[in-house]
Image: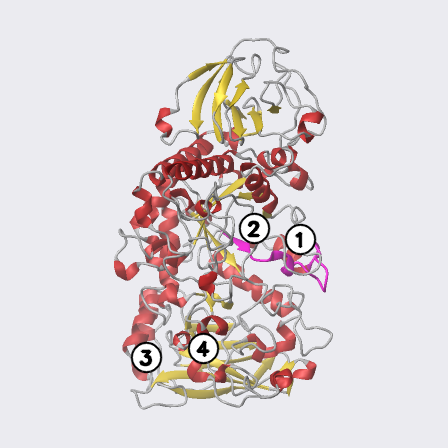
Amino acid sequence: MSSAAEQEAVQRARARVRGRPDGGTDTAAGANGGRGARARQAPARTVWPGAPTPLGARFRVGPDGVAGTNFALWAGGAEAVELCLFDEDGGRGGRGGNLVETRCPLTELTHEIWHGFLPGVLPGQRYGFRVHGRWDPWTGARFNAAKLLLDPYARAVDAGEGNDYGALPPEVYGHVRDWPQQHVADTVRDDRDSAPYVPKGVVVHDDAPDDEWCDDRRPKTPWADSVIYELHVRGFTRLHPGVPEPLRGTYAGLAHPAAVDHLVRLGVTAVELLPVHQFAHEDHLLRRGLRNYWGYNSIGYFAPHAAYAASGTRGQQVGEFRRMVRALHEAGIEVILDVVYNHTAEADELGPMLSLKGIDNRGYYRLQDDPRRYADYTGCGNTLHVVQPHVLRLITDSLRYWVSEMGVDGFRFDLAAALARSFHDVDMLSPFLAVIAQDPVLRRVKLIAEPWDVGSGGYQVGAFPPLWTEWNDRYRGAVRDFWRGALPDVRDLGYRLSGSSDLYAWGGRRPYASVNFVTAHDGFTLRDLVTYERKHNEANGEGNRDGSDDNRSWNCGVEGETDDADIAALRRRQLRNLMTTLLLSTGVPMLVAGDEMGRTQRGSNNAYCQDNEVSWVDWEEREQPGWRQLFGLTARLIALRHRHPVLRRRSFFSGRAHAADGLRDLAWFTARGTEMTEADWYAPAATLGMYLSGRDIPGRDARGAAVTDDSFLAVLHTAERPVDFRLPGPPWAAAYEVLVDTSLEEQEDAPGALLAAGAAVVVEARSVLLLRAVPGDAAPGGAGAEGAGVQGAPGT
């Protein structure tokens, strides 16, 4: 059926169904399109048997021309399920505040799925469920039909005014929140209606062409070539002067040419979006006048967060998100979502009842031996029971939806170890990991694990299967410690710079299994890392008790901002050192939005609830002296990575000598110009030279030719005084060309100078010197061969 014919069917059905919303729903239907033949009139609110699959609300026009929506909900322990439809009442009031609620029992039950088809229910319809069953918290049963529940498969959510309260209303709790005996409050059922205060699902319809997200329209950047840029949809453009005011902080704002141009100029290949699933705000934040900014509090795994939509919340957010993805793809930029499948916004037994807790508490959550309590491997009150088939299906259906119908290119899994727990222990053969590995859609996209949770045995860095890459916090710690002068030796740094082979060189894994990062959303920004030694989270209202105390930062002598020109210059140099180290390291680099232009959070290392200038990117900084140069250096280093395959290797270094000239693919040098010995690796050192050979890099290019490249020498020096570094002589190079010198504010002053091989060069205090090796005809075995063949050197 043509899309035009189906649209006509939708409009005819809408005109014939009495009591339907008019203008707003028309807009939503237009945004989500329609397919099929002309619809004929059908009685409103009639419930036909429908089908148990697919789960959720799916609008369709049947072969008989009847337009309507099929609803299906898994609720294994329920005794009855009511579908609740909400329509505007012209301001006359009603059970749903300004909405009139119509309850429709779903009488069909197939394999624990309650289902029904409602003719005349069209895109834009708001809905929810009431689930009847036993209230017995002592056994984990918390059914309460007084509470309207969000469909976990809802593709759009209308949050209404629920997020504007100064605290979560008591009606949204399944228990009596203010019961005098608090130790048993969660066992006393609250029978007040929650409908006026909770988010509602919205029926949408797919208008994407069947070939919208076919592979040849995706950037498909290989892992080794990727540069990831972590950003917040709202915070990235909220203050952007080039984005029109109505679009700032939205999906449309991120798709705006002014925003995309920054990403293209920088050279990143993927954006990693902080959570965009529909999420809720915690009660304790609302009571302090704050909101959840980061979004790690999901309540709808299929729905784009409605507050990030400029076009509307009655389904329009779906199309707006797709258009954002399309705009980024057209610029060659992939879209990776940070997803939170380990827990939900319903917290523990004292938390609100919004969805899964009321649908089937025992079926969706991990419970303790005392089933009144929740097992908490996440630090957020609950943990989804991923071992259960219907929970695993919910997660994998969600993932496939975002890939196949929303166009995303990968996922970063928050607290991924919690998903890999079979029963109690983390299990790399767990159902979740096994299902992902065999799924024909999901195994082809980028999969990033945050490889830990807060439970016992949860730290799993280096342990995930070969299909996965991981956030490597060992890299973060080593690089931070080196540049603040806190490493006892440079052995760990050597491993981190060369791909972390000690963590990932097993089971067919590659260097790009390591996502290298110095900063992330969680913690100091790069600028704050060199400005503060202590966290400053007072604005969160928790007495500065929240956030990590293990910052591994150095303030360069003064806590906080200063007008001391020398300290300010040193801090900018340290920023250049950290950024250069990151972008020269083997693995996949990840930057945080704004770090390339000196974004500050004023010392906050836990800005999860700061939806304000503390967290938003300040675009005026980009043109300020010092920050303009940092942006230029960052873009230059990313371009260097893109041009030189030796900086983005697809296999680990071997340490073996090349037959033609005796040079190994990776060599390490002391300031004396000699190769590192075993003793050197364990001795205190402030200087490290890393030689990357571009000769015969393993692998082939797209046309099957051998991959060769220039060779490079990077010298990292963290001492407070300059050092004379003797450059390795032949056969390593005949001369060296200076490419980057972080001691210089303006990098245009660095490139082009030629330095003689074997000569001593001054490396300024706390700086990085990047040199290109100019080849010569010298024979193997010259100066610099001392220490060759040392076993166990990092990267080999």
Q: Secondary structure at mark 4?
A: loop
Disc 4 vs disc 1: which is toward the camera?
4
Disc 1 vs disc 3: which is toward the camera?
1
The residue pinned by badge 1 equals 459
The amino acid type, in three-letter code, at marker 4 is Ala
Kindly check if marks 2 and 3 are in contact, taking CB atoms under 8 A apart as contact. no
* Residue 323 screen position, x and y as percent: 35, 57
- Residues 459 and 24: in front is 459
Q: Label 2: few (<14), some or many (≥20) within 10 Å? A: many
The amino acid type, in three-letter code, at marker 2 is Ile
- Res 14 label: 3
Q: Label 1: few (<14), some or many (≥20) within 10 Å? A: some
Disc 1 vs disc 2: which is toward the camera?
1
Give me the residue at 59% from left, 63% from top: 342
Give me the residue at 56% from left, 51% from top: 447
The residue pinned by badge 4 equals 167
Kindly check if marks 4 and 1 are in contact, taking CB atoms under 8 A apart as contact. no
Give me the residue at 40% from left, 42% from top: 596
Label 4 – label 1 distance at C-alpha? 35 Å
The amino acid type, in three-letter code, at marker 3 is Arg
Label 1 – label 2 distance at C-alpha? 15 Å
The residue pinned by badge 2 equals 448
Q: Secondary structure at mark 1?
A: loop
The amino acid type, in three-letter code, at marker 1 is Tyr
The stretch of residues the image draws in magenta is: 410-430
First reached walking from the N terminus: tag 1 or tag 2: 2
For the N terminus, the quadrant is bottom left
For the C terminus, the quadrant is top right
- Residues 634 and 354: in front is 634
Q: Secondary structure at mark 2?
A: strand
Residue 268 part of the magenta segment: no
